[in-house]
Amino acid sequence: MNDHLRRLFAYTAWADALLFDALAHVFEPPEQCLVFARHITATQEEWLARVSPAQPHPDSVWPAWSLREVRDRSDRVHAAWGAFLASEDAADLTRSCAYNDLKGNPYETALGDIVTHVVNHSTHHRGQIATHLRGAGYEVPWTDFIVFVRAGG
């Protein structure tokens, strides 16, 4: 299962990079696309900080970063997630992770469920970005999992 979740997270890194690169080539991307791109990355940082306490929490999960900062932070958080998922700490995906949500409510969730959530959350918001870009008349790269697989992922 750990190999499968590492592969799904590799897919997430690939798809985020494709879509964020596409945004960088749009003269004036719709603001909502930038909002979602920032949120995807900040949320990945937040969940990593929850499961790996050595990682810093972002100041907000709705930050006001530039697109360049989103790309830089996205690269770093994907590398950190990859290292974490390859570590001994992530070997037991059934282990319970205790954390507080953004309102301070305490929860405990299995690591594997958290990783699955992060992947699905990112996919959801990439779909919203793609919808906004298409609505503004831009072509959007295919970020479906099967495209990643066909590309050798």
Image: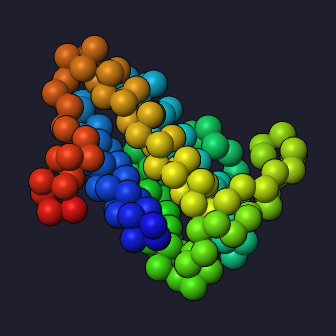
Residue found at x 24% / y 20%: 134
Relative to 100, does residue 34 appear above or below in the rendering? above
Give the camera-side residue of 111 and 14.
111
Residue 64 visible in this rendered orientation of the protein: yes
User: In the rendered view, would you say 125 is above or below 105?
Assistant: above
Residue most toward the bottom? 88
Q: Nearer the viewer, residue 81 or 66?
A: 81
On the rendered image, what quadrant is the C terminus found in? bottom left
Residue 54, percent from left and from top: 69, 76
Location of residue 94 by image quarter: bottom right
Work out whether 92 lies above or below 102: below
Q: Position of residue 126 (x, y in %)?
A: 38, 36
Is residue 41 among what the camera can see?
Answer: no
> In the image as oriented, which residue stretches furthest toward the right?
105
Quarter of the rendering containing residue 137: top left
Question: Residue 7 at what x, y percent from top left?
Answer: 35, 63
- Residue displayed at 45% across by 24% down: 32
Q: Nearer the viewer, residue 145 or 110?
A: 110
Q: Position of residue 13 (x, y in %)?
A: 36, 57
**Quarter of image, res 47:** bottom right
Label count reads 0
Q: State the residue at coordinates (60%, 75%).
A: 92
Quadrant in which the N terminus appears:
bottom left
